Image: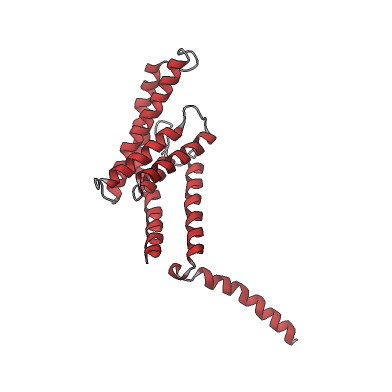
Amino acid sequence: MASFRGSRHRKSTGPRRKLKILNKPLAHWHPIVRQLLNWVVTVGSVLFCLLMLPTRFLGMELLGIGPNWLLIWVVAWSVKRSVWQGMLAGIVLGLLQDAMTSPEPTHAITLGFVGFLTGLVRKQHLIQEDFISIALIVFVMAILAESIFGLQLSFMGDADGGQSLPKVEYIWAYYQRAVLASAILSSLWAPILYYPLNLWWQKIKLLEQG
């Protein structure tokens, strides 16, 4: 009976011990564990954005176009990092989007440009980090990204003799509507993704500095 009670006691304290570890303040965690958790959150947020790209919920669609979640993520990442870190993140996420859609035209150029330009603007201290500024940056970057993507389509059409793709005027007639719809939706939804990610990254940075 004594051995049975002892084993039962050990089994009951097992989940409690795990719960106690999870409830432990993040500052008391081992730096390696914190870093691993940071990577899990970062990679998980990227996967979330990839899954949200083809998803259309109520209020997330305008003229058949949804928010550019990967662009929002690149802006949120690049706004507190160097120019090259932002550009590299944009290229990687662009390649992931190409894997889900089509490699031609590539999204790596557009998102890489967004990451580079966002990091450059932040480096010059031309923006603040409030929600309005982030939404404005996303709005402008969405217009630039869609315009660059439209240029790639136009060049592809010219290279193919205009036979396999619609003519340039039809492409830009569509993108005049698509650019504005994407920019509006992306800027409206940007704070929802930016706020928790920025809060997490800022907390991790303060713990590393401390």
Q: Residue at x 34, y 48 (%)?
A: 79
Rendered location of residue 101, percent (x, y): 52, 32
Task: Identify whether 113 is placed above or below 208.
Answer: above
Instruction: Name the residue: 45% across, 20% down.
Output: 156
Outermost residue toward the bottom? 2
Q: Position of residue 128 (x, y in %)?
A: 26, 50
The percent coordinates of residue 139 (x first, y second) are 32, 38
Q: Is residue 210 visible?
A: yes
Q: Is residue 202 above or below residue 87?
A: below
Instruction: From this view, report whether residue 66 is shown above or below residue 150.
Output: below
In the shown orientation, is residue 118 left or right of residue 66? Answer: left
The quadrant in which residue 107 appears is top left
On-image quarter of the C terminus = bottom left
Residue farthest to the front? 84
User: Is residue 69 in sight in this rendering?
Assistant: no
Residue 18 position in % (x across, y down): 57, 70
Give the residue at the far left of this rendering.
126
Up-down: is 7 above or below 35? below
Quarter of the image containing the N terminus?
bottom right
Identify the residue at horizontal 51%, vertical 46% (top origin): 47
